[in-house]
Amino acid sequence: MSNPSAVMDPSASLVRSGLKTPRAAAIAGILFSVLLISSLWLLMLSMRADPHEAGTWLKTSSERVSLALNLVPFAGVAFMWFLGVLRDRLGRREDQFFATVFLGSGLMFLGMLFVAASSMGALVLAYSAFPDSLLNSATFAFARAFTFDIMHVYAFKMAAVFMVITSTLAIKTQLTARWIAFLGYASAAFVLVGSSYLDWVLFVFPCWVLLVSVYILIDNLRELKKE
């Protein structure tokens, strides 16, 4: 007959579960950053940020734009895991007020990012179906302006709110190092002011998520070495 202590060791399973989840989610945060940076970079190479541009990129770079848009759903899934690791790291220290704004701003950013990608993807598909009539039409002008506004004005404004709340939680609960939290405040202010005018400002948010994820991953590895 087997030894009961060998069969049931709840403390060991709890330790393994607690260590595995944050590490996996920290890697997902890094994956989100890499995918979103790659997507934004491909879009910058392919098209101008100006919502009034004529749409010549549809003739020359539609395949590259489609590749960029196909990266967005995978980045979104990784961002969900990143939200999970932050909540797991907060644990019982999570305040209900800050947690609501934290989760709400993160999900709103993700939702509007998906809507912007869907709108741009629909534009590419519509052009493939009606290449001669779409350009210089009211439909193209509306879809292009809609995509620009929801991406630059609304989605990344929510990303800035997410950075502010996460930085506040980091200071109150030692979620990350304090210098990362202060950098988050500065980055959020930069995104709030500049996302509507400078296309490269959009890279600030995924770079900050990358920094937070790398910090959490290194911190988890340090805890592993101590045990």
Image: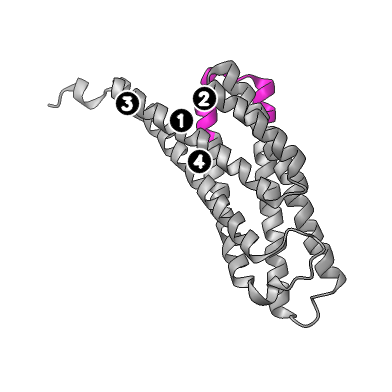
Please say whether residue 52 is one of the residues in the magenta stretch. Answer: no
Q: Secondary structure at mark 4?
A: helix
Whether label 2 touches label 1, CB < 8 Å:
yes
Q: Residue at x 81, y 80 (%)?
A: 133
Q: Of callouts 2 and 4, which one flags the residue occurring earlier in the amino acid sequence?
A: 4
Whether label 4 touches label 1, CB < 8 Å:
yes
Q: Which residue is mark 1?
A: 216
- Mark 3 Cα-neighbour bin, 10 Å: few <14, some 14–19, many ≥20: few
Q: Amino acid at mark 1?
A: Ile
Q: Residue at x 46, y 31 (%)?
A: 215
Please state the horizontal and vertical placement of residue 27, each as a whole percent of the image. 44, 41
- CA separation, marks 4 and 1? 10 Å
- CA separation, marks 3 and 1? 12 Å
Q: Residue at x 48, y 43 (%)?
A: 30
Q: Of callouts 4 and 3, which one flags the residue occurring earlier in the amino acid sequence?
A: 4
Question: Would you say residue 218 is visible in this rendering?
Answer: yes
Q: Which residue is mark 4?
A: 29
Q: Secondary structure at mark 3?
A: helix
User: Which numbered disc, 2 or 3, marks the residue closer to the eye?
Assistant: 2
- Mark 2 Cα-neighbour bin, 10 Å: few <14, some 14–19, many ≥20: many
Please say whether residue 91 is one of the residues in the magenta stretch. Answer: yes
Q: Amino acid at mark 3?
A: Leu
Q: Which residue is mark 3?
A: 224
- Mark 4 Cα-neighbour bin, 10 Å: few <14, some 14–19, many ≥20: many
Magenta-tinted stretch: 84-103
Which of the 4 quarters of the picture holds residue 222? Answer: top left
Q: Which residue is mark 2?
A: 176
Front residue (pair 140, 80): 140
Farthest residue to the right: give it.
138
